[in-house]
Amino acid sequence: MKAVEAFLAAKAVALRTRLRTSLVLEEAMMNIVMHGFEQPGDQRVELAVTLPTGAVCLRLEDEGKAFDPRSAAEPTVAPSLAEAQPGGQGIPLMRRFTRSMDYERIGGRSVLTLTLDAD
Amino acid sequence: MDIAVSQVGEGAGTLVKLVLSGRLDTAGVGQIETRFTAATVAAGRDAIVDLSAVELVTSMGIRMFISVARSMSQRHRRLVLFGARDLVGQVLDTAAIDSLVPHAADQAAAVALLRR
């Protein structure tokens, strides 16, 4: 995350955009790491960051299980704390703070592309 | 992520106040979760959390708040957040956890929620 933020700062990307990018990137990475692989081990995720006009684009590629985050149902809020299960907020946050979320499965690899508006 | 703990009020109405500063992401939660839990759940009092100096909350931070609030609820204690700005306020709105962990505009409103 720090390397991504440093890159964005060097490109004069506004702080608010950098924070949203860090948020979305963390949520995407957590989903891949926690749900994408059966066994711990050599789990590689390749990240590319590009800056098309007015946007920040994150492309994450991994060899984990196929999962399209766009298909995830919206979580329901538990009626009480006793019934609340921590977790499940990552994808709603990705949806909220991205302009678009695209997913492809190419040659056994998941490719997730997240585009955020830049301030 | 830094955490400062103090008390508000006197006697039976004393509350624990926590001031967080920095980022409540995976790394930030890892840094403070033990102290946060000790200062809230173990303290045996209602607690308010000042988020005005927090610049980022991720789902891991939301998870920590819910987990702590649930533990406090089992001890008949409540947790109220206040002062979230900008992106943090938007994250809390998106998570829609206000019915579980209330969020107030400022300290006075947070204390008022607990006094009801």
Image: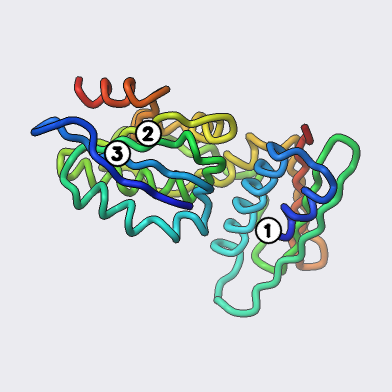
Label 3 and label 1 in one chain: no
Q: Secondary structure at mark 2?
A: strand
Quarter occupied by residue A42: bottom right
Q: On the rendered structure, is A95 left or right of A10? A: left
Disc 1 chain ID: A
User: Which residue is at a point 53% across and 48% down the rendered structure image?
Assistant: B23
* Separation of marks 3 and 1 at Cα, in angstroms: 30 Å
Mark on residue A2? 1
Q: Amino acid at mark 1?
A: Lys
How far from the left and from the top, in percent, is residue A63?
71, 69
How far from the left and from the top, in percent, is residue B84?
48, 31
Label 3, on which residue?
A: B17
Quarter occupied by residue A72: top right
Mark 3 crowd level (few <14, some 14–19, many ≥20, 10 Å Cα): many
Q: Is residue A23 above or below residue A33?
A: above
Mark on residue B81? 2
The answer to which of A75 and B45 lies nearer the viewer is B45
